[in-house]
Amino acid sequence: MILKKISPKGRSVRVTFELPLEEAQYSANIVGSFNDWDTTEHPMKRNDRKGVWTTALSFKPGTQIEFRYFIDGHKWHNEPQADAYAPNPHYSDNSVLAL
């Protein structure tokens, strides 16, 4: 699930990423164009109460990001609520958010 919230002055967009717990057993990271596809950055935290892996990041309004979830150190997963999808060089698609 994706939640977007614009700051009161409109200078940033806070995006909360949530992935159901059953999608990942050990770990989940948010990886994308904003972190040079580094699979070790932006780990998600397990929230047992809500039943999700979650993290929140801030971006500049008007930007577009491509991303995927990197799960358990070896699997890639797209966001079903993405604004769009873009092909990548690995014969699959990236999730796209317009902010």
Image (spheres, rainbow, N blue to C red):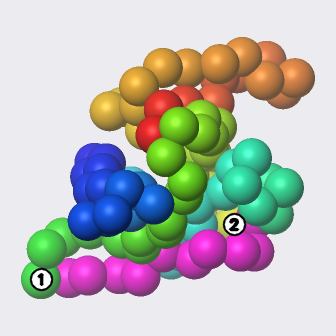
The kind of residue on which mark 2 rests is: Gly
| Image: magenta residue range | 39-48
60, above or below 29, in the image: above
In the image: residue 3, left or right of residue 38: left
* Residue 98 shows in this picture: yes
Which numbered disc, 1 or 2, marks the residue that appears first in the sequence? 1
Q: Residue at x 45, y 60 (%)?
A: 12
Q: Nearer the viewer, mark 1 or mark 2?
A: 1
Whether 96 is among the magenta residues is no
User: Does 47 lie within the magenta span?
Assistant: yes
Which secondary structure dominates the residues rendered in magenta? loop
Q: Tell me the SS state at disc 2.
A: loop
Decide which of 66, 39 is in the foreground and name it.
66
The x and y percentages for residue 67 are: 62, 44
Where residue 96 sits in the image (x, y, percent)? Answer: 54, 31
Please, which residue is most extreme toward the front here?
9
- The residue lying at 54 percent from left, 58 percent from top is 59
Work out how far the residue at label 1 is from the one at label 2, CA to CA, in angstroms. 24 Å
Left or right side of 82 for 65: right
In the rendered image, residue 90, in percent from the top left (x then y), is placed at 84, 26
Horizontally, residue 62 falls left or right of residue 31, namely left
Indicate the position of residue 17 as horizontal and vertical percent values: 38, 58
- Label 1 sits on residue: 49
79 or 14, which lies in front?
14
Q: Which mark is residue 75?
A: none
**Amino acid beneath label 1:** Arg
- 91, above or below 23, in the image: above
Task: Farthest residue to the left: give it.
Answer: 49
Q: Residue at x 55, y 20 (%)?
A: 85
Q: Residue at x 57, y 77 (%)?
A: 43
Name the residue beneath numbered marker 2: 73
Characterize the local packing of mark 1: few (<14), some (14-19) or many (20 or more) Cα atoms within 10 angstroms: few
